[in-house]
Amino acid sequence: MIPFELSWRGGATEARLHRVRPGIDALPWGTIELSRYPDAHGLEARKVWSNGVFTEYASAAAFSALTTAMLQCGAPVDLVAMCADIVVDELFHVELSARLTMELGGAVPLGFDLAAIAPVTTPGIRPLLRAAEIAVTTSCVSESLSVPAMARSKALAEAPLVAGVLARLLADEGPHARLGFWFLDWANEELTDAERAHLARLAADTIEVYAPLWAEGDAACGTCPLPAGLGGHDAVGRAKLRTAVDVAIATPLARYGIEIDRGRLAAIASP
Ligand SMILES: [Fe+2]
Ligand SMILES: [Fe+2]
């Protein structure tokens, strides 16, 4: 496995990014007192945030692929522009999360082949359906789940820097979760019933991947370090995620005729 590492150029490219995404220097860097937390919490926080850096990076790749697919199916230009702009949001989130990870003591090693970072879509499908697949998996499902997860982490965050970074990430995630539904507003009439059924199965498959986030098992063991004050979350957060599966994903998707099997959904979203 190839270790996941970031590189940074600095200079004119950094200045350009910070011109369009200002405010990073106003965050309270250098204020985390790691000695206030048990060692196990510090390590768990490094794991949570190292993984966070990677998921932000993967989100940039996903919205980038969605931008291309939307261009290939002639989606509304302003909607495509929003999608391309979200790629920059996610790259800024990579920077914020990576800097926070460094303040927590540095990243834990993660292995991932970046050649496989782009979202996988069904081979041979037309551009409209390919865009719909990525819109559903990336925006309607993944981003809709990151909103309640981050909101709970922020509510629990004790360190001002962690709260500040989470507030900044969270401010962007709402629109990221809207984009997929706005794409469906435009694309839905063109989709066939069979394609909607396919998208519903795909949505359920994607939700299932996230199920460990709301499973009570591990986290309820009482000995697992939960770095709540440093960016982790808790039983309330897990319940909010289960609610979001219905309220923020399944119910709005059903309005487009993308109806996830209710029995399967109940099984996936159970504690
Ligand atoms: Fe993000
Ligand atoms: Fe996002």
Image (cartoon, grey):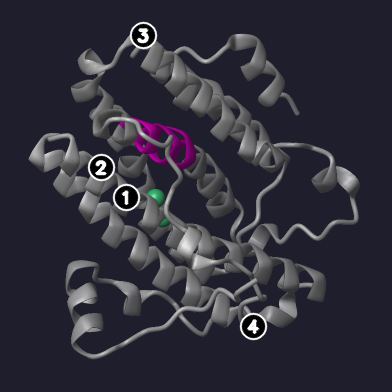
Estimate the spatial distance between the alpha carbons at disc 1 and disc 4, rounded to whole Å: 33 Å
Estimate the spatial distance between the alpha carbons at disc 2 and disc 4, rounded to whole Å: 39 Å
Residue linked to disc 2 = 69
* Labels 2 & 1 near each other (Cβ < 8 A): yes
Q: Which corner quadrant holds the C terminus?
A: top right
Per the image, label 3 sits on a secondary structure element best described as helix
Amino acid type, residue under disc 4 in the picture: Gly
Compared to residue 252, the image places residue 167 above or below, namely below
Query: Quick one: which residue is furthest to the bottom in this view?
Result: 11
| Label 1, residues with CA under 10 Å away: few <14, some 14-19, many ≥20 | many
Residue 104, image quadrant: bottom right
Residue linked to disc 4 = 105
Residue linked to disc 1 = 65
N-terminal label among 3 and 4: 4
| Percent coordinates x, y for residue 258 in the rendering | 41, 15
Amino acid type, residue under disc 3 in the picture: Asp
Amino acid type, residue under disc 2 in the picture: Ala
Residue 5 vs residue 60: left or right?
right
- Of residues 16 and 259, the one nearer the viewer is 259
N-terminal label among 1 and 3: 1
